[in-house]
Image: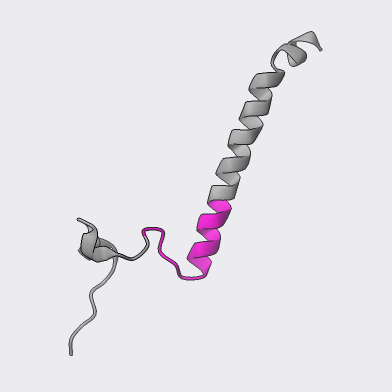
Amino acid sequence: MSWLWEQSGTIFVLLIVIAVVVLILYSLRRDKQKGRSPCGGHCGHCPMGGACHSKKDPS
């Protein structure tokens, strides 16, 4: 029990980090379900802009 008490600060920080990661993953999943892009969709300013979104066919 004393080991657990000595490690309580580390355990507390670990729980906070896990909670933040879970919230980030939940947010990314929710945005993907709504059709939002994590990059914001501003492909003109992105060096990989043509690679992640298909360009519309002009015909």
Question: Is-magenta flag for residue 34?
Answer: yes
Residue 59, picture quadrant: bottom left
Q: Position of residue 58 (x, y in %)?
A: 18, 86
Residue 40, picture quadrant: bottom left
Q: Check the image and report above or below for 55 versus 43.
A: below
Q: Check the image and report above or below for 16 versus 37.
A: above
- Determine whether, in the image, residue 8 is placed left or right of residue 22: right
How was the colour assigned to the protein in this rendering?
one colour
Question: Is-magenta flag for residue 46?
Answer: no
Q: Position of residue 44 (x, y in %)?
A: 22, 65
- Determine whether, in the image, residue 53 is placed left or right of residue 29: left
Q: How many marks?
A: 0
Dominant secondary structure (helix, strand or loop) of the stretch shown in magenta: helix
**Which residue does the image show at 63% across and 34% down from the upper left?**
16
- Determine whether, in the image, residue 17 is placed left or right of residue 45: right
**Which residue does the image show at 58% across and 54% down from the upper left?**
26
**Which residue does the image show at 41% across and 59% down from the upper left?**
38
Q: Nearer the viewer, residue 37 or 44?
A: 44
Q: Nearer the viewer, residue 41 or 25?
A: 41
- Which residue in the rendered view is the most extreme toward the bottom? 59
- Which residue in the rendered view is the most extreme toward the right? 1
> From which residue to which does the magenta span run?
25-39
Q: Position of residue 51 (x, y in %)?
A: 23, 62
Q: Position of residue 31 (x, y in %)?
A: 50, 63
Q: Check the image and report above or below for 33 versus 21.
A: below
- Which residue in the rendered view is the most extreme toward the top? 2
**Which residue does the image show at 44% across and 67% down from the upper left?**
36
User: Quick one: quadrant of the N terminus?
Assistant: top right
